[in-house]
Amino acid sequence: MISGLTYSIIAGKFDEYILELQNKICNEVEYSDGKEKFLTDNWTRDEGGGGISRIINDGAVFEKGGVNTSKVFGKLPLAMQEVFNVPESNFLACGLSLVLHPRNPYVPTVPTKRIVMNILLINIAIMKQGE
C-alpha cells in the first residue's frame, strides 16, 4: 500500500472516476447522436449502495444504449467467504458498464457489446472499524 492511501480513499477516487467517465461518455454519445438525450435512473440497493443507469433510445445514430455505474457494498456472503477462504468480511464493488447499439447495421456495436470495468475489494481486514 502506498503511504497515506487507504482503501477508503482508493474506493472513493475510483467511484469519482467512474461517475466522471459515465458523464463524459454520455455527453459524447449525445453529441455524436445529435438527436436524443440519455434518461437517468438513480437506484439503491437495500443491502448497501446503488447506482446510476443512463439509457438512450431512438436516436439518429444510436438505436439504443446504456451507460451504467454501480457502487455496492455490504457483508460478504458465506458462499464467497468459503471460496476466498476468509472469515466474516465486508465487500465493496464499483463498476461501469457500457452497451451501445448503432442504428446502422454496418457499424459495429461496442466490441463484444459490452465493456466492463469492475473493481471488487474483498475486505479481509480492509474495511476496518472506524475507517
Image (spheres, rainbow, N blue to C red):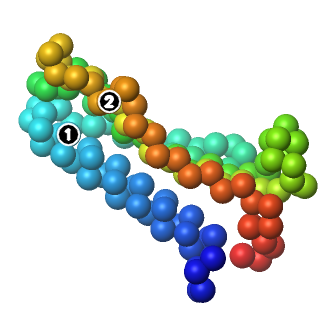
Kindly identify which numbered label has been placed on residue 79: none
Q: Is residue 40 above or below residue 21?
A: above
Task: Give the residue drawn at x 72%, y 76%.
Answer: 131
- Residue 126 falls left or right of residue 110: right
Task: Give the residue drawn at x 34%, y 54%.
Answer: 21
Q: Nearer the viewer, residue 110 or 73?
A: 110
Q: Which quadrant of the view contains residue 109? A: top left
Residue 92 in view here: yes
Kindly identify which numbered label has been placed on residue 111: 2
Q: Amino acid at mark 1?
A: Val
Q: Is residue 19 above or below residue 115?
A: below
- Cα–Cα span, label 1 and label 2: 16 Å
What x and y, as percent, mark residue 82?
A: 88, 42
Q: Amino acid at mark 2?
A: Pro
Residue 58 in view here: no
Crowding at dot 1, Cα within 10 Å, few <14 / some 14-19 / many 20+, comes out as many
Crowding at dot 2, Cα within 10 Å, few <14 / some 14-19 / many 20+, comes out as few
Kindly identify which numbered label has been placed on residue 29: 1
What x and y, as percent, mark residue 100?
A: 29, 29
- The first of marks 1 and 2 along the sequence is 1
What x and y, as percent, mark residue 77?
A: 82, 42
Q: Is residue 93 above or below residue 43?
A: below
- Location of the N terminus by quadrant is bottom right
Query: Which residue is farthest bottom?
Result: 3
